[in-house]
Image: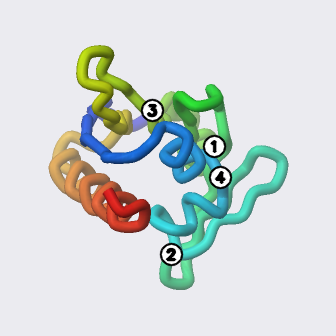
């Protein structure tokens, strides 16, 4: 088992929670910003990027709130890691943010955070945020 460290990012997204949830929880939504293409079969999402693919099992899905996945490779290696995309609405301002929880090796956290920031910027462009 590796020593992956859990980290979180919170990024404001100007969007309705309904639109945002669709973009983070469906293959069609995720293929618009997260990967080149996304397929699903038996709660396993297959993400395609530049001719390669990765599979992630959908662990939990809370309607309108969050989705949590685990990479199949990590599962097979006995890792307790996952990545979660959660929607947070500020009670006072009604500002909407996406909270990303993920794991990375200590020397790869900064790079992983930059990758997520780029992905969320792509999501923002897609939804006009």
Query: Disc 4 versus disc 2: distance between alpha carbons?
Result: 17 Å
Q: How many marks?
A: 4
Mark with earlier residue (4, 3): 4
Discs 4/2, front: 4
As drawn, which residue projects farthest toward the bottom? Answer: 51
- Residue at figure coordinates x 30%, y 22% from the top left: 90
Which mark identifies residue 49? 2
Query: Disc 1 versus disc 4: distance between alpha carbons?
Result: 24 Å
Residue topped by disc 3? 86
Helix, strand or loop for disc 1 = helix
Query: Disc 2 versus disc 3: distance between alpha carbons?
Result: 23 Å
Query: For this view, does 50 lie left or right of residue 125?
Result: right
Helix, strand or loop for disc 3 = strand
Query: For this view, does 108 lie left or right of residue 48?
Result: left
- Residue at figure coordinates x 33%, y 55% from the top left: 120
Say whether marks 4 and 3 touch (CB < 8 Å).
Answer: no
Residue 13: which quarter of the image? top left
Instruction: Bin the neighbour count of mark 1 within 10 Å (Cα to Cα): few under 14, some 14-19, many 20 and up.
Output: few
Instruction: Bin the neighbour count of mark 2 within 10 Å (Cα to Cα): few under 14, some 14-19, many 20 and up.
Output: few
Query: Disc 4 versus disc 3: distance between alpha carbons?
Result: 14 Å
Query: Disc 2 versus disc 1: distance between alpha carbons?
Result: 21 Å
Residue topped by disc 4? 26
Residue 129: which quarter of the image? bottom left
Discs 1/4, front: 4
Instruction: Bin the neighbour count of mark 4 within 10 Å (Cα to Cα): few under 14, some 14-19, many 20 and up.
Output: some
As drawn, which residue projects farthest toward the top? Answer: 91
Residue topped by disc 1? 76
């Amino acid at each position: 088992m590796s020593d992956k460290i859990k980290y979180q990012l919170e990024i404001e997204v100007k969007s309705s929670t309904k639109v945002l949830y669709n973009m983070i929880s469906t293959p069609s939504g995720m293929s618009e910003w997260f990967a080149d293409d996304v397929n699903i079969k038996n709660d396993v999402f297959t993400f395609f990027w530049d001719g390669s693919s990765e599979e992630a099992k959908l662990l939990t899905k809370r309607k309108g709130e969050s989705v949590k996945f685990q990479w199949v490779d990590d599962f097979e290696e006995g890792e307790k890691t996952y990545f979660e995309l959660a929607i947070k609405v500020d009670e006072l301002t009604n500002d909407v943010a996406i909270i990303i929880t993920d794991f990375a090796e200590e020397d790869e956290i900064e790079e992983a955070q930059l990758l997520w920031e780029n992905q969320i910027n792509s999501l923002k462009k897609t939804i006009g945020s």
